[in-house]
Image: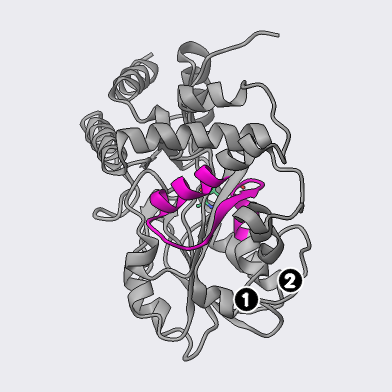
């Protein structure tokens, strides 16, 4: 097998932190070994810090980011419940699909792809929804949605936020913003391989949860017991290597400091967006709502999307992402997440892109 190094500048996965990779190769512990249980407790505690929450139910769900999405909906939404979903990209669409399968009455609030949601429109879409759901960082478009503004006006509703691409890369403050439940994924700005969904759920959502969710595996009552200190009960075999890897990456992240990580992502995003504009590219996401960790540009007229991305990959070992849904072939999505968010990668990509386009 040929092992090839890549600079992973797509929408995910990013390059894992070296600490995360080292975590994967530690000797295996049993899933009930006291040393592993201590490591799991510390992982949950560090996740609380990263989420900005005191929520007891904060843990890594076994599965990718979408498992976090599924867990969020099946534990709070049952047949006939009204769920308002803000949709301005692929992951908002996916939320509608998941909520619909729970039997929800889904009330969509759309904004054009590339534009942010209007918090007022989301809040006035229904007089009494059970849940208001939105994506904080839309990876399909590079747009940030204002979760804090929606949570501030939620009234009696629960606010459910997708933070897969935001956590670790831009500020997320679950308790300060009063978000009721949220999930993330390990392969975006947390700098770990794909495979876990960091999750948090607060007391309001706990009180109003579905007592017996249709999913056995994602029933948070049972998963919570599996991660909770002395009351711990076997639920499923923890993905030990992944949790060890996440534990190591969270250690690296907290050593740098959350603010340090946010600043580094901001600096790389600004350098990339500035550099792309200097090369003549038009940024796609609305100004003022651009994610530093995921930059989107329009593919210039006459440029072959697939050929350029192939050349970047084969000549320079750099992966960038194409557009999805209605924007396939029309935009590029360039990630600067986790360990990939380094100025050296920005400079390399800008040079490689300009060289590729001038050939
Ligand atoms: C990547 C992503 C997901 C899905 O995560 P998977 O790990 O691919 O299952 C969900 N929401 C957003 C915003 C994402 O970027």
Q: Few, some or many C-alpha atoms within 10 Å of disc 2 (few <14, some 14-19, many ≥20)?
A: many
Q: Which residues are magenta?
A: 41-69
The answer to whether the residue labelled 2 contacts the one labelled 1, judged by CB atoms less than 8 Å apart, is: yes
Q: How is the image coloured?
A: one colour
Above-or-below relation of 53 to 118: above
Circle 1 packing at 10 Å, graded few (<14), some (14-19), many (20+), is: many
Residue 207: say if magenta: no
Q: Residue at x 35, y 31 (%)?
A: 341
Above/below status of 155 relative to 67: below
Distance, label 2 to label 1, CA atoms, is 9 Å
Residue sitting at x 53%, y 36%: 246
Q: Quadrant of residue 178?
A: bottom left
Q: What residue did someone put label 1 on?
A: 209
Q: Is residue 186 rendered to the left or right of residue 334? A: right
Q: Nearer the viewer, residue 337 or 254?
A: 254
Q: Nearer the viewer, residue 168 or 302?
A: 168
Where does residue 205 sit, x and y in percent of width and height? 54, 74
- Is disc 2 placed on a helix, strand or loop? loop
Find disc 2 in the rendering and name its residue.
213
Q: Position of residue 208 (x, y in %)?
A: 59, 80
Side of 87 where 238 appears, left or right: right
Specify the farthest residue to the top.
2
Helix, strand or loop at mark 1: loop
């Amino acid at each position: 097998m040929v092992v090839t190094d890549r600079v992973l500048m797509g929408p995910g996965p990013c390059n894992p932190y070296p600490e995360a990779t080292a975590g994967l190769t530690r000797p295996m512990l049993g899933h009930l070994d006291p040393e592993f249980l201590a490591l799991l407790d510390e992982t949950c505690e560090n996740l609380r810090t990263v989420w900005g929450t005191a929520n007891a139910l904060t843990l890594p769900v076994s599965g990718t980011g979408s498992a976090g999405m599924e867990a969020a909906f099946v534990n709070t939404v049952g047949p006939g419940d009204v769920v308002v979903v803000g949709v301005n990209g692929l992951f908002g669409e996916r939320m509608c699909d998941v909520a619909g399968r729970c039997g929800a009455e889904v009330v969509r609030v759309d904004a054009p792809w590339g534009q942010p949601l209007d918090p007022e429109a989301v809040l006035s879409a229904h007089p009494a929804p059970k849940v208001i759901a939105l994506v904080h960082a839309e990876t399909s478009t590079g747009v940030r949605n204002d979760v804090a503004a929606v949570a501030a006006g939620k009234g009696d509703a629960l606010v459910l936020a997708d933070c897969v691409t935001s956590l670790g890369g831009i500020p997320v403050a679950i308790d300060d913003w009063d978000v009721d439940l949220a999930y993330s994924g390990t392969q975006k700005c947390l700098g770990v391989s794909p495979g876990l969904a960091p999750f948090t759920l607060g007391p309001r959502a706990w009180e109003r949860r579905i007592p017996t969710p249709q999913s056995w595996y994602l029933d948070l009552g049972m998963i919570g017991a599996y991660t909770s200190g002395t009351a711990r009960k076997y639920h499923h075999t923890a993905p030990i290597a992944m949790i060890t890897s996440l534990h190591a990456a969270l250690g690296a992240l907290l050593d740098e400091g959350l603010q340090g990580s946010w600043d580094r992502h901001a600096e790389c995003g600004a350098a990339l967006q500035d550099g792309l504009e200097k090369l003549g590219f038009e940024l796609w996401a609305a100004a003022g709502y651009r994610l530093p960790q995921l930059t989107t540009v329009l593919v210039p007229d006459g440029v072959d999307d697939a050929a350029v991305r192939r050349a970047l990959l084969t000549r320079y070992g750099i992966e960038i992402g194409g557009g999805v849904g209605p924007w396939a072939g029309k935009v590029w999505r360039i990630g600067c997440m986790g360990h990939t968010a380094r100025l050296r990668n920005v400079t390399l990509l800008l040079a490689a892109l300009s060289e590729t386009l001038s050939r």
